[in-house]
Image (cartoon, rainbow, N blue to C red):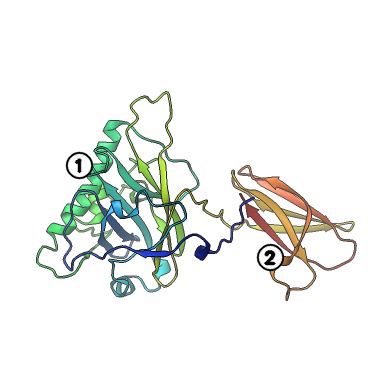
């Protein structure tokens, strides 16, 4: 059974990617880090080649550099106002050890991304490359590795919002304007899984995209990458408690995938990790679930724990 709370130091030594040069110079296969929220400026960074994050031993921890948290703070205060997305594309890639036709995207929801048709991948790659190319073109005389552009209602031509939606106010940045079957933007603080999307032109046989790892951003703007298919903790469930005849029934919202169990204690000074388990666990199914505890007249505090 995998615990949700994992000590990162147990995975591997901390690595650091080389930061970019001072100017934003986009090259096909570079990894873009973009911050977006309607009503605030978009902020785009080029944080170097996506190859820095590929083929690493599972559990390797990388402290992501190459972006300016002071610039983020100037546009998003606090950072929790922002959502972040990471993306890269290798359309027309020549040489090296990267695939020719692929892109990489963060996935912020609990769905399972799949490889896509060649036409869909070409559209995604076109969007990603336009974001990078326009950010570089609009900052050609700048000494900073960043591009700040307006979002709606006055989206800057050549900015992230404009490039994703084509300037349409009815566009959807969350799914790269409908080209991705999952949400690519993650709120801060939060964790997004990072997938390599390839070509699958046989729609009758779904092919799972490859999870490269996950990116996590904390409330201070610190960004960390963990290599490998690390599970993303499910969201905390909303719970209600009803007591009838000495039986406490805890109802809560669930999602498909994790299991849930009930922890209890009569003393809040005891760490939750040491609380006892009441009854058996249940599997999440995307609907309302219940757990019960027969307590008699004793007072108890409860936590619903989700785990994989």
206 vs 169, left or right, is right
Q: Residues within 10 Å of mark 1 (few under 14, many from 20)?
A: some
- Image vertical order of residue 269 relative to residue 260, above or below: below
* Residue 204 position by quadrant: top left
249 versus 302 height, above or below: above
Instruction: Give how far across and how far down residue 285 sits, in percent.
Output: 63, 42
User: Disc 1 and disc 2: Cα gap in Å?
Assistant: 49 Å
Q: Residue at x 77, y 73 (%)?
A: 267
Q: Residues within 10 Å of mark 2 (few under 14, many from 20)?
A: few
Q: Dot 1 lies on which element?
A: loop
Q: Indicate which disc residue 273 carries.
A: 2
Identify the mark nearer the N-term, 1 or 2. 1
Label 1: which residue? 93
Relative to 144, 296 lies left or right: right
User: Is 198 drawn above or below residue 240 in the view shown?
Assistant: above
Q: Which residue does the image show at 29% across and 35% down from the upper left?
A: 120
Q: Residue at x 22, y 52 (%)?
A: 131
């Amino acid at each position: 059974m995998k615990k949700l709370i994992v000590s990162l130091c147990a995975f591997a030594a901390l690595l650091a990617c080389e930061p970019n040069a001072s100017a934003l110079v986009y090259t096909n296969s570079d990894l873009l880090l973009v911050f977006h929220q309607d009503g605030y400026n978009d902020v785009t960074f080029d944080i170097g080649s996506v190859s820095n994050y590929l083929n690493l031993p599972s559990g390797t921890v990388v402290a992501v550099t190459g972006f300016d948290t002071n610039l983020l703070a100037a546009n998003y205060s606090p950072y929790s106002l922002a959502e972040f997305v990471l993306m890269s594309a290798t359309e027309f890639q020549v040489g090296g050890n990267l695939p020719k036709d692929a892109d990489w995207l963060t996935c912020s929801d609990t769905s399972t991304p799949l490889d896509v048709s060649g036409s869909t991948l070409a559209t995604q790659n076109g969007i990603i490359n336009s974001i990078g190319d326009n950010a570089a073109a609009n900052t050609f005389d700048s000494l900073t590795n960043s591009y700040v552009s307006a979002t709606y209602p006055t989206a800057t031509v050549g900015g992230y919002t404009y490039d994703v939606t084509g300037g349409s106010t009815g566009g959807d940045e969350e799914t790269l304007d409908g080209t991705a079957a999952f949400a690519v933007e993650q709120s801060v603080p939060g964790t997004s899984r990072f997938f390599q999307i390839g070509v699958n032109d046989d729609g009758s046989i779904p092919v799972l995209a490859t999870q490269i790892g996950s990116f996590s951003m904390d409330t201070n703007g610190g960004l960390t990458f963990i290599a490998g298919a690390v599970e993303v903790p499910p969201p905390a469930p909303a719970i209600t408690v009803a007591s009838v005849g000495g039986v406490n029934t805890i109802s809560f919202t669930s999602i498909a995938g994790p299991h849930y169990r009930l922890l209890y204690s009569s003393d809040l000074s005891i760490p939750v990790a040491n609380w006892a388990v009441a009854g058996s666990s249940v599997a999440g199914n995307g609907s309302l679930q219940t757990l019960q505890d027969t307590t008699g007249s004793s007072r108890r505090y409860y936590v619903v724990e989700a785990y994989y």
